[in-house]
Amino acid sequence: MTDTPLDVFEIGAGRSFIFGGVYAANDGFFAEVHEQKNGQIRRIAQSRGLPSREVAVAWMTQRCQAGA
């Protein structure tokens, strides 16, 4: 598994900044969504294993847009 995301999606939303990444895993892909607020970052969602990069990007994009 790599620590560097394959794809990143960012949305600025006032004082809160929502961003996510897609990562390769041994058995597919997974995605995470984070929020940066007041200088602190917290993970707000993480997928389980997803079958393709495209599915992971769609999962991440949908949750980033919902978080904004």
Image (spheres, rainbow, N blue to C red):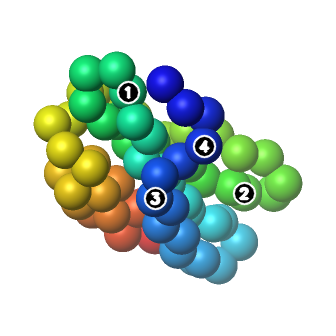
Tell which circle, 3 or 1, labels the residue nearer the N-terminal end. 3
Mark 3 and mark 4 in contact? Answer it, CB < 8 Å: no
**Residue pointed to by mark 1:** 25
Q: SS at mark 1?
A: strand
**Residue underneath mark 4:** 4
Q: Earlier in the sequence, mark 1 or mark 2?
A: 1
Between marks 1 and 4, how big is the CA–CA gap?
Answer: 11 Å
Residue carrying label 3 = 7
Image x and y of residue 24, in percent = 40, 36
Q: Amino acid at mark 3?
A: Asp
For mark 4, give the secondary structure. loop
Label 3 to label 1: alpha-carbon separation: 14 Å
Residue positioned 47% across, 52% down in the render: 6
Q: Is residue 45 visible?
A: no
Task: State the CA–CA distance, disc 3 to disc 4.
Answer: 9 Å
Image mark for residue 37: 2
| Callout 2 amino acid | Lys
